Amino acid sequence: MVDILLVEDNTELCGLLCELLRAEGYTVSSAETGEKALSLYEKYGARLVLLDINLPGMDGFTVCKAIREKENTPIIILTARAEREDKLNGILLGADDYIEKPYDIDILLAKIKGIFQRRLARDIITEGDLVLDLNAETVTKNGEALPVSMKEFALLRMLIENKGQTVAKEQLFNRIWGSDSESEPQTLTVHIKWLREKIEADPRSPQLIQTVWGKGYRWGG
């Protein structure tokens, strides 16, 4: 999962923003159309979406609505459209902020930093005797720290957040390893095995991370 998905059809501006955001330490993917943005989001996810409104084909309002119907990912609209009706529409569709172009890049970076700090500061997932700290990316079981890698943590988080639902192997692999990964899909099976050894009472008969044969995995805790 990337930190930021930037949806901007202005190639020059998109390139500049990507460089600035990466210089700040964020991982960034970009899309020039709404259709591509939703495709990337569905496959790889994002912790924050920066969204232009005036896009070829599907506009930013439609993208905002589609994301918000499924997840609570923060969305900042960046647009030249300054009409009151557009601002209201964006906020009503679930955008967290609406910033007019041209904007001060330092203010934008400050808003982005603030969103990450606020969300990470309160993001704790408790599932049975497991506690996931989304800020530190650590896991404890009955109060004792488990030695999980970043990939294992991401897998565990995704499974728990989709509790009771089968998550396809392809979806897990794409979200955790990404489109640019040189890893083989088989590495997913290996990481699932390692996770089971750390969290299951009996790894040979897993009750938490259940295999749905031919499809993927489901959290059954």
Image (cartoon, rainbow, N blue to C red):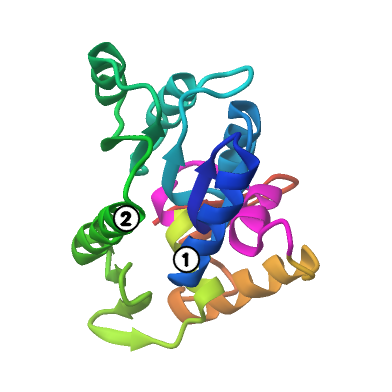
Amino acid found under the numbered disc labelled 1: Tyr
Q: Nearer the viewer, residue 188 or 56?
A: 56
Query: Is 136 situated above or below 60?
Result: below
Q: How many marks?
A: 2
Disc ID at residue 26: 1
Is residue 163 visible to us here? no
Query: Is 120 situated above or below 84?
Result: below
Query: How far from the left and from the top, in percent, is residue 13?
Result: 55, 45
Q: Nearer the viewer, residue 217 or 125?
A: 125
Query: Which residue occupies 29% across, 28% down?
Result: 94
Q: Is residue 179 magenta?
A: yes
Pick whichever of labels 2 and 1 is earlier in the sequence.
1
| Extreme residue toward the top, this view | 85
Q: Quadrant of residue 83?
A: top left
The range drawn in magenta is: 160-180
Q: Quadrant of residue 39?
A: top right
Q: Nearer the viewer, residue 203 or 112?
A: 112
Q: Does residue 11 appear left or right of residue 93 in this picture? A: right
Query: Which residue occupies 25% across, 57% down?
Result: 119
Could you say whether the residue bearing mark 2 is in a helix, strand or loop? helix
Amino acid found under the numbered disc labelled 2: Ile
Query: Which residue occupies 46% across, 73% down?
Result: 200
Task: Determine which residue is flagged by label 2.
Answer: 112
Query: Which residue occupies 74% across, 62% down?
Result: 180
Query: How far from the left and from the top, in percent, is residue 54?
Result: 51, 22
Q: Is residue 44 magenta?
A: no
| Residue density around tag 2, few if under 14, some if 14–19, many if 20 or more, within 10 Å | some
